[in-house]
Image (cartoon, helix red, strand yellow):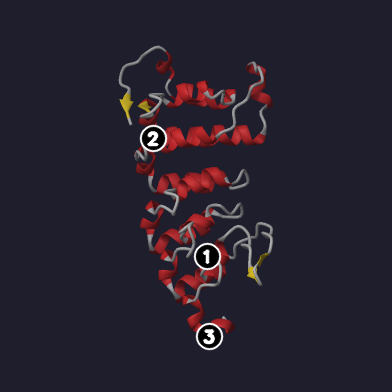
Amino acid sequence: HALLDFYPQALAVYDVDGFWPLLYVVMAASVPLRRHGSSMGHGRPRIVSHHVVEYLIQQEPLALLQTTRNERRAIPLHLAVENPFLTVELLDLLLQVFPETIYYQDGGGRLPIECAISASDELDLSAIRRLIEAAPVLLSFVSDGSLLLHRYLDGLESTDEEVDIEAIHQSTPSILRAANILEAVVQACPSALRIQESTTLCTPLVQACDDDIAVPCIYTLLRAWPEQVTTQKHLIFA
């Protein structure tokens, strides 16, 4: 408070790395700082202060729309959902003034929900579910011939190991997390299971099988629509 009382214009000033004050507060770790041509390393993930974020938004609501002045072109929401310490309460705070920011794409064309599900194994699943609840229609948007579900599966690691039913109960936390994310996505948008990716013509289940995705993830897709293994009806091209 004292710093802004002395120099309120600071809220409208970005640093040499192209970051505004609110972006620094919500992001997962400090960005490299350019000093005399060198770069400092990234810091550890940090807890986001709800009080500080709320105060900065009150002082300058438009800060929620400020993008990083670099190729990432990210708004605070993009960076916040990559922070493993993000809470549902803080997420609601970021969406309160400009809820439409959930539809904003960064410089790479990624939506906040895409940043959230691919950023960290530590981000609370409740925050991901809140993002999905805020705009489930995003799950049915086609970008470059694919849905968010296709792109998420494409980013999952394949497994070459032979597994059996017992392996489901011995899955790693990251695999179980991926299965939970898939469950949240298909529950919010069941029709996504019927969409074929435009290039490969694969449905999400076929894509998961072709890519040797972990068995629990495949079972999650299968349980959501068991009939898909025996029918080619009602499939849709992306």
- Quarter of the image that includes the N terminus: bottom right
Residue assigned mark 2: 146
Marks 2/1 in contact by CB < 8 Å: the verdict is no
Please tell me which residue is depicted at 42% across the width and 70% down the height of the picture.
61
Furthest-bottom residue in this view:
6
Which numbered tag is attached to residue 194?
A: none
Give 124 or 213, whichever is nearer the viewer: 213
Badge count: 3
Q: Amino acid at mark 2?
A: Ser
Give the mark, 2 or 1, whose residue is nearer the N terminus. Answer: 1
Please tell me which residue is depicted at 42% across the width and 49% down the height of the picture.
109
**Secondary structure type for disc 3:** loop
Which numbered tag is attached to residue 7?
A: 3
Q: What's the distance in space between the residues labelled 2 and 1, CA to CA?
A: 30 Å
Q: Amino acid at mark 1?
A: Leu
Q: Amino acid at mark 3?
A: Tyr
Task: Give the number of the mark in front: 2 or 3.
Answer: 2
Furthest-top residue in this view:
230
Please tell me which residue is depicted at 49% across the width and 36% down the height of the picture.
152
Give the mark, 2 or 3, whose residue is nearer the N terminus. Answer: 3
Q: Residues within 10 Å of mark 2 (few under 14, many from 20)?
A: many
Which numbered tag is attached to residue 23?
A: 1
Q: Residues within 10 Å of mark 3 (few under 14, many from 20)?
A: few
Please tell me which residue is depicted at 55% across the width and 62% down the height of the picture.
26
Give the mark, 1 or 3, whose residue is nearer the N terminus. Answer: 3
Across and down, in percent, residue 184 comes to 48, 36
Task: Give the number of the mark in front: 2 or 1.
Answer: 2
Give 208 or 224, whichever is nearer the viewer: 208
Image quadrant in which you'd find residue 104: bottom left
- Quarter of the image that includes the C terminus: top left
Across and down, in percent, residue 32 comes to 63, 63
Q: Residues within 10 Å of mark 1 (few under 14, many from 20)?
A: many
